[in-house]
Amino acid sequence: MKILVPVKRVIDPYVNIRVKSDQSGVETENVKMSMNPFCEIAVEEAIRLKEAGKAEEIIAVSIGNQSCQETIRTALAMGADRGIHVLTEEKIEPISIAKILSKICEQESPGLVISGKQAIDGDNNQTGQMLAALTDMPQGTFASKIEIDSDKVKVTREIDGGLQTVSLNMPAIITTDLRLNEPRYASLPNIMKAKKKPIDQKSPEDYGIDVTPRVNILKVIEPPKREAGIKVENISELVEKLKNEAGVI
Amino acid sequence: MTTLFFIEHANGQLSDQSLKAITATSQIDGDVHGLIVGSNIDSAVAEASKIEGLTKLIHVDDDNFNNIMAENLTQLILNISEDYEYFLAAATTTGKNVMPRLAAKLDVSQISEIIAIEGPDTFIRTIYAGNAIATVQTSDPKKVLTVRPTAFKAAAMGSSECEISKIDAENMPSISEFIGEELTKSDRPELTSAKTIISGGRGMQNGENFELLDKVAEKLGAAVGASRAAVDAGFVPNDYQVGQTGKVVAPELYIAVGISGAIQHLAGMKDSKVIVAINKDEEAPIFDVADYGLVADLFQVLPELEQAL
């Protein structure tokens, strides 16, 4: 079985976000970039399934500009076998990403697609569900546990208020939540080995997909700043303020 | 132009998240129809039919919807999608699971977790976990949206019922199966809907010490949360996590205990109405966003706080 893992390049989660002064977006020039944390979890899970003998090959896919190759290399260094880079300079939306991935699924016929539940830049939380729709596959979103049992996969999902378990016919799409695993760091020898692993370069046109955005970003602003309040001396002062000043208890 | 809003419910009660999110539909012109699904849910249906602003309630009484599977619910909405221009649901784990699947079936983009409606095709939403706010305009003919419940006030209940129309669940795909659910049993509210939250960070030192927070939470009727650092250290499970990669919350009162205030935690709680920080390090960044800061040893003051409430 093949596992397809889409990976996204995003601003590193520990970097302070700066909104551009012309309100056109968020500054990404000269900012540290990393693989989206939920995608890292997806790569890790695919590798664990391969290590457990449940999968033979892991294909990492990234869609975006030239530097997305680095993100694919990171996945290869962690343990993915080969990469597909779909090169585009367009600001690409989840629906277009899902369409490209659905074409890749047609060509590669993976038994599972494991993706992050959302990217921490756009916070859309859509691509996996959309890919499932386009391929008519079942979906197991926000996964905290994955168990393959012959032609079905059992997915434990993080839902509001607890956990839900579903069984999906394979092929299926799974999106990862935080508790699924703790991603490994790539070792130096594996980083060296990853340089020799193949990455196929494609374009959206190769898949016949029009990636023209449908959603226009009119402006991006900073959220209202919170002012630091006051320091209280002790608990009785705190409780008094919360009761009488803030009125929240 | 008609809007379809998916209404969630559990144990005969309408979801508080749905009641908040449905308020967003009042800013869209035209009729609003509610959709409610399940089997033997008469009390929830009766309640839903009284939601102010609804002109019609579509009720599906079918065993397929005892538990909601995205594959089935998407197909159900697709069956009636021709009649609607807007499709909305609360940004709950169900809404987030279903609405993108629906959008892709309709070949449109989905707009996630809107916090305001600017115009018929223009919406405001947060990106980068709330570190930036984007105004976006869609050119798609049909609009599929999820709504962040914390951004809206719960809809009022009217005194009379709206028209109720029953439809059948046809063409269910049956490619997935519900196995079971393990819901956290607690008398306390859920993190995402709690009015008060008390969260612990690395300063709690271990999982047992979270009992100190539990005791305060008990008094306040609060939910207990945690920073990523506390989750990473294994003190508490990940479903406690508030932050960019965990839950985004906006309660009336947020009490951060032993939390330094890393960016990714602030991103998950800085829309709270009142923030209290308790930390022994007076330089901790959490104090920059706190309305009330107390520089103190949490092990000394938490029992005091419990006593004082």
Image (cartoon, coloured by chain):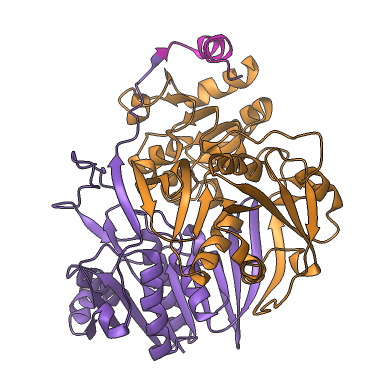
Chain colours: A purple, B orange
Please report the residue visible at 29 percent of the width from the left and 44 percent of the height from the top: A219
Observer able to see residue A163: yes
Residue A25: x %, y % from top left: 25, 47
Residue A152: x %, y % from top left: 61, 83
The number of callouts visible is 0
- Part of the protein shown in magenta: A231-247
Compared across the picture, whether B173 is left or right of A222 comes to right
* Image quadrant containing the C terminus of chain A: top right
Q: Is residue A240 magenta?
A: yes
Image quadrant of residue A201?
bottom left
Compared across the picture, whether B289 is left or right of B28 comes to left
Please report the residue visible at 83 percent of the width from the left and 54 percent of the height from the top: B41
In this view, the residue in front, B282 or A163, is A163
In this view, the residue in front, A194 or B2, is B2
- Farthest residue to the left: give it: A30
Please report the residue visible at 66 percent of the width from the left and 79 percent of the height from the top: B173
Q: Is residue B257 magenta?
A: no
In this view, the residue in front, B6 or B14, is B6
Residue A186: x %, y % from top left: 28, 70
Image quadrant of residue A227?
top left
Observer able to see residue A183: no
In this view, the residue in front, A38 or B34, is B34
Main secondary-structure element of the magenta-colored stretch: helix
